[in-house]
Amino acid sequence: MSMYEVCAKCGHVGRGRYVEKTFAVVAPDAKTAAKIARSIPRVKHHHKDAIRYVVEIDRDRYLDIRWRNMADPYLCSTSKHEQRRLCGDYIDIREEPDRDPRTKEESSGMKVYDGKKVLRNPRKYFRYNDPKERFAA
């Protein structure tokens, strides 16, 4: 079994943002090391580019990364309140390059009406107000 250094995008720092963290992983090959790193908590599991790179390392580098991760308050925090309190402004938060910020109206593109009334939240409105009941005799 070889030791690998895996750099991955970690989340829970805001929509469209990420933090790069390095993890030390023991695996038979680099592909398996990337798979193991993707399953670590806080790593962005569903992003295609969640794994930045995988490099084979020696035992000294492996232990160094493990000790650094144990001392990292971002990885050791258990809630977002604790994360904000411990980490503050020290973590290097990066923006996703391909994300475009959109407003609510731009995302839907269409307004939904009930008669002349514009519905602010159509999904919620139709869940509580069955349209079949309005036309029942």
Image (cartoon, rainbow, N blue to C red):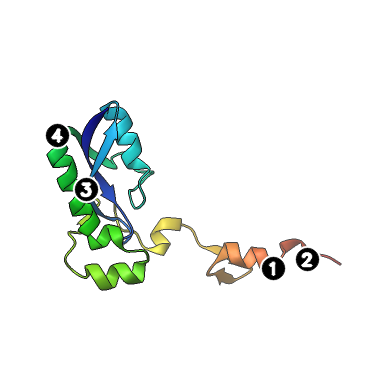
Residue 101 percent across, percent down from the top left: 30, 58
66 or 107: nearer the viewer: 66
Residue position for label 1: 129
9 or 23: nearer the viewer: 23
Residue 114 visible in the current orientation: no
Are the two marked residues, 1 and 2, in contact with CB atoms closer than 8 angstroms?
Answer: yes
Residue position for label 2: 133
Q: Residue drawn 65% across and 64% down?
A: 126
Image-based side of 76 in relation to 113, left or right: left
Residue position for label 3: 66
Residue position for label 4: 58
Residue 132 percent across, percent down from the top left: 76, 61
Amino acid beneath label 2: Glu
Q: Residue drawn 34% across and 71% down?
A: 81
Give the number of the mark in front: 4 or 2. Answer: 4
Badge 2 local density, few (<14 within 10 Å), some, or many (20+)?
Answer: few
Cα gap from disc 1 to disc 2, whole angstroms: 8 Å
Cα gap from disc 2 to disc 3, whole angstroms: 62 Å
Are the two marked residues, 1 and 3, in contact with CB atoms closer than 8 angstroms?
Answer: no
Amino acid beneath label 1: Asn
Vertical position of residue 124 compared to residue 59: above or below? below
Badge 3 local density, few (<14 within 10 Å), some, or many (20+)?
Answer: some
Residue 78 percent across, percent down from the top left: 36, 64
- Label 1: state its secondary structure: loop
